Image (spheres, helix red, strand yellow):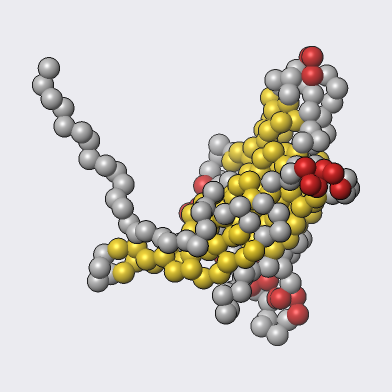
């Protein structure tokens, strides 16, 4: 048989980033690289050195975390990054009513003196299994970031409940306020807009929820978002969020 040359790689080595700690999870969004070690969060600004023709990564802030990191999820609009925390047996032994299973960091907040941006904890009664951001609809992708729709994130918890979280103070509202407005310095707050509990019908396809995802609608002119949930018994449910 004739030898077939290997296909050219679609990716090229852009740059190398030296980190103080080993990273277990990374996310890239809107010119930023977010990385997390077991107990620390890092953020780099990605730029291009025109003279050298290479990407350059500049560390702009880092934050020490009190709870280990399981994974990080960046929002499609580049405004937030969600840190899913590993809730180990130490928290289970304490038996506190709610744990910060997810923290949402505001990437749209201006950075000064390498200080990390504000963040808000999404409290859950048990460890979080998954977290996913609301996808951008095609109409929003084609528009400017200032016209971006409100962000939302869905989480699945060990207690079998799916929670849809929304913002009380959207970033586009903060940016539109006068510079001397006190509300401008308030970080976006998140609240559970909807909760979908599991049931005891696992033998009939139901049971606790073990996964959830937000899906954009098929119509590019619509901003309708669908919520898909999976239960332990195998049932798949599609809801209009």
Q: Is residue 224 visible?
A: no
**Image mark count:** 0
In the picture, measured across the screen, residue 221 lies left or right of residue 82, that is left
Quadrant of residue 126 within the rendered picture: top right
Q: Quadrant of the C terminus?
A: top right
Which residue is at a point 83% across and 19% down the rendered structure image? 201
In the picture, measured across the screen, residue 18 lies left or right of residue 217, that is left
As drawn, which residue projects farthest toward the left?
2
Which residue is at a point 31% across and 47% down the rendered structure image? 11
Which residue is at a point 42% across and 61% down the rendered structure image? 18
Looking at the image, residue 17 lies above or below residue 212: below
Which residue is at a point 85% across and 22% down the rendered structure image? 200
In the picture, measured across the screen, residue 147 lies left or right of residue 7, that is right
Q: Nearer the viewer, residue 73 or 205?
A: 73
| Residue 139 picture location, percent across and down | 53, 50
Q: Quadrant of the N terminus?
A: top left
Looking at the image, residue 181 lies above or below residue 48: below
Q: Is residue 202 visible?
A: yes
| Residue 190 picture location, percent across and down | 75, 57
Q: Nearer the viewer, residue 103 or 162?
A: 103
| Residue 59 picture location, percent across and down | 48, 68
As drawn, which residue projects farthest toward the bottom?
180
| Residue 225 picture location, percent across and down | 65, 42
Q: Nearer the viewer, residue 236 or 111?
A: 111
């Amino acid at each position: 048989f004739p030898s077939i040359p290997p296909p050219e790689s679609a990716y090229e080595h852009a740059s190398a980033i030296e980190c103080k700690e080993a990273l277990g999870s990374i996310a890239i969004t809107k010119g930023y690289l977010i990385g997390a070690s077991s107990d620390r969060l890092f953020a780099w600004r990605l730029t291009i050195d025109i003279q050298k023709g290479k990407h350059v990564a500049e560390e702009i802030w880092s934050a020490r975390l009190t709870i280990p990191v399981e994974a990080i999820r960046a929002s499609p609009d580049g405004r937030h990054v969600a840190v899913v925390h590993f809730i180990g047996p130490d928290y289970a032994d304490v038996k506190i009513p709610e744990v910060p299973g997810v923290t949402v960091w505001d990437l749209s907040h201006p950075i000064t003196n390498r200080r990390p941006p504000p963040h808000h904890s999404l409290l859950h009664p048990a460890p979080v299994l998954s977290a996913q951001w609301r996808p951008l609809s095609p109409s929003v992708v084609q528009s400017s970031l200032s016209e971006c729709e409100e962000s939302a994130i869905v989480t699945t918890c060990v207690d079998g409940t799916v929670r849809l979280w929304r913002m009380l103070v959207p970033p586009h509202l903060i940016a539109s306020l006068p510079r001397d407005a006190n509300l401008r310095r308030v970080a976006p707050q998140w609240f559970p807009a909807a909760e979908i509990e599991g049931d005891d019908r696992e033998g009939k396809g139901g049971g606790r929820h073990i996964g959830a995802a937000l899906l954009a609608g098929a119509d590019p002119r619509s901003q309708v978002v669908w919520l898909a949930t999976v239960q332990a018994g195998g049932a798949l449910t599609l809801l209009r969020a």
